[in-house]
Amino acid sequence: MIKIQSWIDNPDRDYAKGVALFAQYSKNKALVRYFQTGTARFRMGKLVYEMGKVAKTVSAVKEHPVEQRGMPRCNSTSISLAKPHSVTLPPYILAAKKEISALYALIDKRHRELYDLGTSNADDVVRHRKRILDDRKPAIERADHLYRLKEEWFALDDGTAREQVANDIREVLAAPLAKQWTICAPVETRHGTSLRTNVSGLTDLQLSKRRTQLRSSITKTQNMLQYQSIRKATSPTPMPKGPKRNEYEQKLKALKAEFKAVTDELARRVAN
């Protein structure tokens, strides 16, 4: 509890340490994986919020421990355990939570696309990088705004102020996205019809850097297919069949095609 609160109170929070603490105390493996595959720039706010929830949970457990040993046995008629009332969230809050999750997934996807694109300054790469950044910006702004409104709604009691926040949430949900989201074309086609022409315009240093980036991307994509994580786990948990798996398989095929084109071009230059 002290470690968690110290991390939250520190103005110079270390994202990696925060993720490690969250993984230590949280049972939500999906959320842990979400933070592990992200960066401080886009996920620090959500990490701080989730760490605050963990701190409250740990504190509550310490203040009211459940004594499992030495408890007298009792039948169901002697003691009636009060069950907490289930809370039904309004439709606009459920819709906001769903859209925030979708936006975070989209932002993460755009981040991976930027990484896969590499650091080349070729004209077609620069244009494609700008398109990705232009698409990502409104998603980040919308997700951040909607997330803050949702948290504000939970913090308020029923009344005029809460209803005003509810109206703001409904207004955001009803507004169209600033961009029409589209999935980027596979690597082997997004720069044109010929990979050979594309790689031949790069310098030797750019080709070498791109080869290293592609190796890393191929490994991460293979891990996603085999373990549903960018890092290799102790035991395989293959990604189930469906649109997501199909997308990753196409991505892997595209990355391998570009990797072959880069290595072939480097070999050609060495031979000449």
Image (spheres, rainbow, N blue to C red):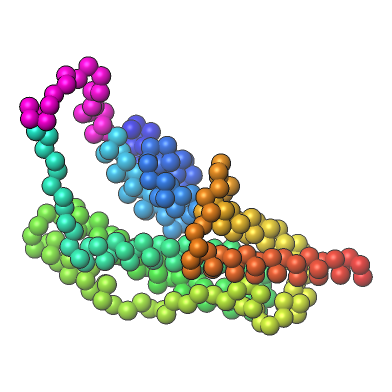
83 to the left or right of 93: left
Vertical side of 48 occupied by 217: above or below: below
Main secondary-structure element of the magenta-colored stretch: loop
Q: Position of residue 51 (x, y in %)?
A: 35, 44
Considering depth in this image, is 243 or 154 the residue closer to the camera? 243
Please say whether residue 67 is one of the residues in the magenta stretch. Answer: yes
The image quadrant that residue 261 belongs to is: bottom right
The image quadrant that residue 88 belongs to is: bottom left
Considering depth in this image, is 199 or 258 the residue closer to the camera? 258
Quadrant placement of the C terminus: bottom right
Vertical side of 12 occupied by 211: above or below: below
Q: Is residue 126 visible?
A: no
Vertical side of 142 occupied by 227: above or below: above
Q: Is residue 240 visible?
A: yes
3 to the left or right of 130: left
Please state the extent of the stretch shown in magenta in the rendering: 59-79
Residue at image x 68%, y 83%?
Answer: 193
Q: Position of residue 13 (x, y in %)?
A: 42, 44
60 to the left or right of 214: left
Q: Position of residue 101 (x, y in %)?
A: 36, 61
In the image as oriented, which residue stretches furthest toward the bottom? 193
The image quadrant that residue 97 belongs to is: bottom left
25 to the left or right of 205: left
In the image as oriented, which residue stretches furthest toward the right? 272
Q: How many marks?
A: 0
Residue at image x 56%, y 57%?
Answer: 225
Residue at image x 42%, y 55%?
Answer: 43
